[in-house]
Image (cartoon, rainbow, N blue to C red):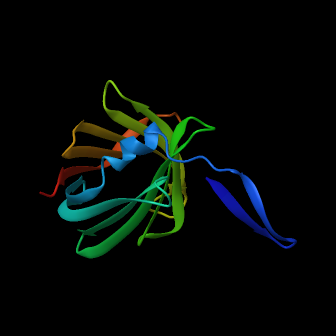
Amino acid sequence: MAAVLVTGGGVGLAQEMPGPGPEHEALKRHEGEWIATVKSPEGDSKGTMTLKMECGGLWLASDFRAEFGGMKFHGRGFDGYDPVKKKYVSVWVDSMSPRPLLLEGTMDAEKKTLTMFGEGPGPDGKPVKYKNVTHFPDADRQTFTMHVVDADGQATPMLTIEYVRKK
């Protein structure tokens, strides 16, 4: 697939652009509608998540909606695979912060677990290090746990979301 490059000097043909690989196909398997049960110290709540491959099959776009403490919450994410870094990459934005959460990590196929690390805004708005772990026991269930990582590298769970595919 060639890309068109538009610059101040005109239009030209750029180098061949990579298409989706096996890692993108693995992401594609998660497309669909999901029911979410959020468990946090503030209490449990329900939500929904819609996942759809976009941008030529390179990005799994997520649309997450829930309520936390009686407040509506909306989040959007884009998950992909960077073949240069050989890592999964993610960007997350939501209605509780004006700054994105950026993550990268690896999939343990044997354990069916994706572990990602990154930095983004914390509850107080200051930068925080995160560790996100998603376990995929089968095609219709996912368990996502978000951890805050302290200065000593100790990860403390912040919330867990159990997802079940909507039938």
The residue furthest right is: 9
**143 on left or right of 56:** left
Residue 15 vertical placement versus 106 (above, below): below
Pick the residue in front: 102 or 96. 102
Which residue sits at x=42%, y=37%?
Answer: 115
**53 on left or right of 65:** right
- Estimate the x, y position of residue 25 in percent, counting from the top left: 40, 43
Which residue sits at x=46%, y=54%?
Answer: 57
Q: How many marks?
A: 0
- Estimate the x, y position of residue 48 in percent, counting from the top left: 23, 64
Pick the residue in front: 42 or 115. 115
Quadrant for the C terminus in the image: bottom left
Residue 59 vertical placement versus 117 (above, below): below
- Estimate the x, y position of residue 22 in percent, counting from the top left: 44, 37
Q: Can residue 4 be seen at all in this image of the molecule?
A: yes
The residue furthest left is: 167
Q: Can residue 128 be seen at all in this image of the molecule?
A: no
Residue 70, located in which quarter of the rendered image? Answer: bottom left
- Estimate the x, y position of residue 46 in percent, counting from the top left: 18, 63
Which residue sits at x=54%, y=48%?
Answer: 19
Residue 37, located in which quarter of the rendered image? Answer: bottom left
Pick the residue in front: 143 or 126. 143
**70 on left or right of 149:** left
**129 on left or right of 157:** right
